[in-house]
Image (cartoon, coloured by chain):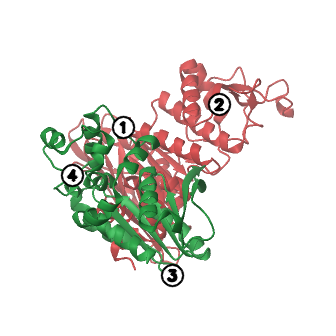
Chain colours: A red, B green
C-alpha cells in the first residue's frame, strides 16, 4: 500500500498554526526546499501518522488534522482530527463506502463485515478507533492501515544512526524480534538478521555496500575490545564490524567513519526489514549527509532502484546540491513555506513547469534556486 | 586583445570550433586555448587540453571549454561567467545540439536557454546546432570524397535517398547517425574518438562552409555571424 496524498494542519486559528497543503506522492519522492520550509516537519508528520495507525504511539500533539489517501488496488481515504487531545472526527472510506464514522465523545458507527451490518460503538476519546477496534474478521479494512503503520520506518540519516549504540546480548533471553522502528539498534538488526536468514542477508548487505563504493568482503557483529559495562560483568559489549577488501583486519563500530556507518546502518536496516517482509514506506531525512558525492548518489540510485522494483515507497529529503543535481526532477517535491503554510510543488500538480525546466539547460539545483518551480518561465 | 569564451558540449564541437576560428581569423592572429571540465566528487574543475598557437602578440584570445555533456553547457556558463568577466573576457558563446530534443521543441528550447542567464557581467549567447553539429559537417558535402574517394554524391543518394550537396542537412533528424552510416559504406566509421572526429574536421572545406554552408543552414549562419562580429 502506498501513501497517495496527505494534507495536514494543526493548531488552526492560533499563533502556533501550521498547515501542509495537499502533498501528492509517487513511489519515489525527494523533498527539497530552503531551510525552515518544513521538509523535516513533513517527513516527521508522515512518521507520526504511521506510528499512530499501528498503535506505537498515542496522540502526541493536542491538535491535529490529517486528510490522507492511501492506495492499495483502490483508494483508501482516512480522516483524523483532534483538539485538546480528544478525537473530534475519524473516518475511513474505501472505494467510496464509509466504513468508519466516528465523532466527538468517541461515539461512531462502524461496518461489521461478517455480520453484514453497521454497528454503533464508543472508543476512548484519545484513542484511534482504527487501532482500538482492530478485528481482522469484523473490521478487516483496518489491517492495511495497521500494516502500513507498522512497516513505515523513519531513518534520520543526519544523525549517528546507531553509531553510538552498542549491544549486550543476554544468552538466556528469548530471541524476540528487534523493534524495527528503533533505528539505533544496528548491531541487533544485523545479529538477528544473520541468525534468522544466514549468509544470504549478510551477502546482500555486502553487495549493497560494494554497489555504493564501499569495498567490503565481510560484515558482522563482534565484541568491542576494551569495552565493558559494570552491571553486565561477563557479557561482551558488541557492535558492528566491517572487513574492507584492502585491509588485513576488521574495522569495528568505534573506528568506522560516521559517513560509512550511516550508509552501513541504513543498508543493514533496510535489508533486515526486506527479509522480514516489513516494508511499507521508507522515510529518510537528510539523505546523503556525511557521504561523499559518489557514494551519496550511488546510495540514492540504489534506493530508487529498490523502490521501482518492489512495493516499497521512498520519501527522502535533502539540502545537498550535488544530490539534487543527480536525482531526476520527476522525483522532486519542492516545498515552499509562506507564513504558516507549506506548499508542495511536484510533477503531480505542476507538470508543465517541471517539463518546461528541461528547456532551460540549467542544472536541477537551479530549479530550486531560481524559484522556477513557482511560475516557470513567468518567474522574474 | 579581444577575449571570447566558447562553451561547447563535447570534444567534437571543440575540435570543429577550433578549426573554424583558425580558418576564419587566420592562425597567426588568434590564440586558442582548449579546456575541459572534469567532475571530481561532484566538484567541477577545469583542465587544460591544448594551447593552440598561443602567443602574446595576437589580436584575439579564445578559450573553448568542453563541458562534457549538453546538460552542463548552460550551468557551466552561469557558474563561470563572473570569473571570466573579472579576467577581462568580453563575451561568452555557448553551442549545443538540439538532439535529443525534438525539432518542434526548437523555439521553446531557444526561449528556455535565455532563462536565468546572468546579464550583469558580460553578454552571453547560446546557439543551437540543428539538429546536431554533424548536420554542418554533412552540409559541407565535398568533405565526403576527401574522407574516401568512393563516397560520391551518387553513392550517397542511391543508398540513402538524400543529396547533401543540394538539400539542407538541418532537416535530418539524427545527422550523426547519418554520417556514421555514410562512412560505413567504405568501411570507415564516424565515432566520438578524437582521431575519427579530427579526420572529419580536417576534411571540411571551411571556405565553402563559410560562404555556402552558412546560407543553406540557418543555425550555422547564426553561429558564424556571431563569430564574425567578434573578429571584426
Callout 4: 10 Å neighbours few (<14), some, many (20+)? many
Callout 3: 10 Å neighbours few (<14), some, many (20+)? few
**Helix, strand or loop at mark 2:** helix
Q: CA distance from mark 4 to mark 2?
A: 62 Å
Can you identify the residue that label 4 sits on? B172
**Helix, strand or loop at mark 1:** loop
Can you identify the residue that label 3 sits on? B120
Pick the front one: A290 or A341: A290
Instruction: Residue B68: tell me if it is visible.
Output: yes
Give the left or right position of residue A53, taking residue A211 as reference.
left
Instruction: Residue A374: tell me if it is visible.
Output: no
Can you identify the residue that label 2 sits on? A188
Parent chain of label 1:
A
* Closer to viewer: mark 3 or mark 1: 3
In the rendered view, would you say B12 is above or below A336? above
* Closer to viewer: mark 4 or mark 2: 4
Amino acid at each position: 500500500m502506498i501513501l497517495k496524498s496527505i494534507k495536514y494542519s494543526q493548531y488552526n486559528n492560533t499563533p502556533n498554526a501550521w498547515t501542509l497543503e495537499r502533498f501528492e506522492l509517487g513511489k519515489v519522492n525527494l523533498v527539497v526546499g530552503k531551510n525552515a520550509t518544513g521538509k523535516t516537519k513533513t517527513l516527521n508528520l508522515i512518521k507520526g501518522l504511521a506510528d499512530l495507525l499501528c498503535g506505537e504511539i498515542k496522540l502526541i500533539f493536542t491538535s491535529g488534522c490529517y486528510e490522507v489517501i492511501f492506495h492499495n488496488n483502490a483508494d483508501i481515504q482516512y480522516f483524523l482530527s483532534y483538539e485538546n487531545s480528544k478525537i473530534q472526527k475519524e473516518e475511513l472510506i474505501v472505494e467510496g463506502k464509509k466504513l468508519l464514522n466516528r465523532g466527538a465523545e468517541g461515539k461512531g458507527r462502524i461496518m461489521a463485515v461478517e455480520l453484514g451490518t453497521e454497528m454503533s460503538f464508543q472508543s476512548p476519546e484519545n484513542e484511534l478507533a482504527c487501532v482500538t477496534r482492530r478485528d481482522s474478521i469484523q473490521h478487516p479494512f483496518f489491517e492495511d492501515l495497521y500494516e502500513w503503520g507498522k512497516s513505515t520506518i523513519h531513518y534520520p540519516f543526519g544523525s549517528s544512526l546507531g553509531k553510538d549504540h552498542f549491544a549486550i546480548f543476554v544468552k538466556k533471553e528469548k530471541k524476540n524480534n528487534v523493534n524495527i522502528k528503533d533505528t539505533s539498534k544496528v548491531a541487533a538488526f544485523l545479529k538477528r538478521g544473520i541468525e534468522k536468514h544466514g549468509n544470504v542477508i549478510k551477502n546482500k548487505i555486502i553487495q549493497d555496500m560494494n554497489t555504493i563504493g564501499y569495498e567490503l568482503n565481510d560484515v558482522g557483529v563482534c565484541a568491542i575490545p576494551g569495552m565493558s559495562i559494570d552491571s553486565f560483568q561477563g557479557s561482551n559489549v558488541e557492535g558492528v564490524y566491517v572487513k574492507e577488501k584492502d585491509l588485513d583486519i576488521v574495522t569495528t563500530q568505534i573506528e568506522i567513519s560516521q559517513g560509512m556507518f550511516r550508509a552501513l546502518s541504513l543498508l543493514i536496516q533496510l535489508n533486515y526489514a526486506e527479509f522480514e517482509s516489513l516494508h511499507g514506506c521508507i522515510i529518510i531525512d537528510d539523505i546523503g549527509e556525511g557521504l561523499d558525492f559518489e557514494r551519496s548518489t550511488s546510495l540514492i540510485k540504489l534506493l530508487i532502484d529498490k523502490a521501482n522494483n518492489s512495493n516499497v515507497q521512498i520519501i527522502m529529503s535533502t539540502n545537498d546540491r550535488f544530490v539534487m543535481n543527480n536525482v531526476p526532477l520527476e522525483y522532486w517535491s519542492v516545498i515552499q513555506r509562506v507564513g504558516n503554510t507549506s506548499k508542495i510543488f511536484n510533477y503531480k500538480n505542476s507538470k508543465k513547469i517541471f517539463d518546461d525546466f528541461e528547456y532551460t539547460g540549467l542544472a536541477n539545483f537551479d530549479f530550486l534556486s531560481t524559484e522556477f518551480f513557482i511560475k516557470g518561465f513567468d518567474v522574474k | 586583445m579581444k577575449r571570447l569564451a566558447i562553451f561547447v558540449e563535447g570534444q567534437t564541437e571543440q575540435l570543429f570550433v577550433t578549426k573554424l576560428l583558425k580558418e576564419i581569423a587566420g592562425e597567426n592572429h588568434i590564440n586558442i586555448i582548449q579546456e575541459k571540465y572534469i567532475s571530481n566528487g561532484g566538484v567541477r574543475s577545469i583542465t587544460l587540453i591544448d594551447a593552440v598557437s598561443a602567443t602574446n602578440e595576437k589580436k584575439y584570445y579564445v578559450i573553448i571549454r568542453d563541458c562534457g555533456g549538453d546538460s552542463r553547457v548552460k550551468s557551466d556558463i552561469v557558474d563561470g561567467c563572473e570569473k571570466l568577466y573579472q579576467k577581462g573576457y568580453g563575451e561568452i558563446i555557448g553551442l549545443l545540439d538540439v538532439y535529443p530534443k525534438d525539432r518542434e521543441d526548437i523555439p521553446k528550447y531557444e526561449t528556455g536557454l535565455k532563462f536565468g542567464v546572468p546579464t550583469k557581467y558580460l553578454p552571453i549567447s547560446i546557439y543551437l546546432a540543428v539538429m546536431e553539429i554533424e548536420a554542418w559537417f554533412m552540409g559541407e558535402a565535398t568533405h565526403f570524397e576527401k574522407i574516401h574517394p568512393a563516397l560520391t554524391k551518387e553513392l550517397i543518394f542511391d543508398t540513402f535517398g538524400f543529396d547533401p550537396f543540394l538539400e539542407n542537412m538541418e532537416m535530418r533528424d539524427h545527422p550523426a547517425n547519418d554520417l556514421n552510416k555514410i562512412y560505413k559504406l567504405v568501411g570507415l566509421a564516424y565515432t566520438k574518438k578524437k582521431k575519427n572526429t579530427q579526420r572529419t574536421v580536417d576534411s571540411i572545406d571551411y571556405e565553402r562552409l563559410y560562404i555556402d554552408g552558412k546560407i543553406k543552414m540557418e543555425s550555422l549562419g547564426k553561429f558564424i555571424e556571431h563569430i564574425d562580429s567578434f573578429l571584426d
